[in-house]
Amino acid sequence: MNIDWNHFTPWTSLAGGLLLGLAAALFILVNGRILGISGIIGGLLRPRKNDVGWRLSFVLGMLVAPLLYLLVAGPVEARINASWGMVVIAGLLVGIGTRYGSGCTSGHGVCGLSRLSPRSLAATLAFMGAGFVTVFVLRHVLGA
């Protein structure tokens, strides 16, 4: 295994993790809700009274934040070493996984683990394990 030292960013990664943790903590303190993206977006598909505004604001913030970053820092080179078909299939599998797992990586991995939820620990171990196995098979067995 080799580390790509040119793209190894421990300080920016740490800062991003701290911001994510702070946002999740503030969200649960202010709203009494878990900061799980799939649950927030899923709530828009079956809206309840007085529940749409904050969800739309959250999704809008997720869409606007990268645009603001682009204005401040300039464009970022995005590299995806997969075909569009693979990206679509991966997205569908992640969507199916969030339905079966009753939550996504942000809900289980960030918020659930910080609350010491056994269900979130099981879900996080499952999706991380599946990710490790998938990368190993694709890169080392199939050579993709």
Image: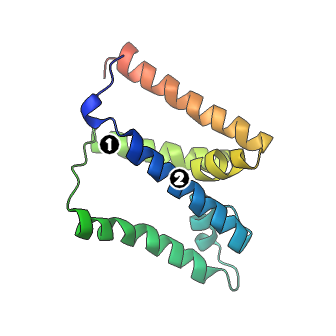
Q: Quarter of the image for the N terminus: give it.
A: top left
Q: Which residue is depicted at the point 77% across and 44% down?
A: 116
Q: Position of residue 128 (x, y in %)?
A: 57, 33
Asked if one can make out residue 89 in the rendered structure from this viewpoint, the answer is: no
Which residue of the protein is positioned furthest toward the front in this rendering? 11
**Most foreground residue, 48 or 108:** 108
Q: How many marks?
A: 2
Q: Which one is earlier in the sequence, the residue at label 1 or at label 2? A: 2
Q: Position of residue 30 (x, y in %)?
A: 69, 73
Q: CA distance from mark 1 to mark 2?
A: 34 Å
For badge 1, the amino acid type reads: Gly
Q: In the rendered view, does 44 fall on the left or right side of 88?
A: right
Q: Quarter of the image for the C terminus: give it.
A: top left
The quadrant holding residue 51 is bottom right
Q: Could you say which disc has been placed on residue 85 in the image?
A: 1
Asked if one can make out residue 123 in the rendered structure from this viewpoint, the answer is: yes
How crowded pointer 2 is (Cα within 10 Å; few <14, some 14-19, many 20+) is rated as few
The quadrant holding residue 118 is top right
Q: Position of residue 36 (x, y in %)?
A: 62, 58
**Most foreground residue, 25 or 123:** 25
Q: Nearer the viewer, mark 1 or mark 2?
A: 2
How crowded pointer 1 is (Cα within 10 Å; few <14, some 14-19, many 20+) is rated as few
Q: Position of residue 59 (x, y in %)?
A: 49, 71
**Judging from the image, what secondary structure is the residue with disc 1 in?**
helix
Question: Residue under circle 2?
Answer: 18
For badge 2, the amino acid type reads: Leu
Q: In the rendered view, does 76 fall on the left or right side of 97?
A: left
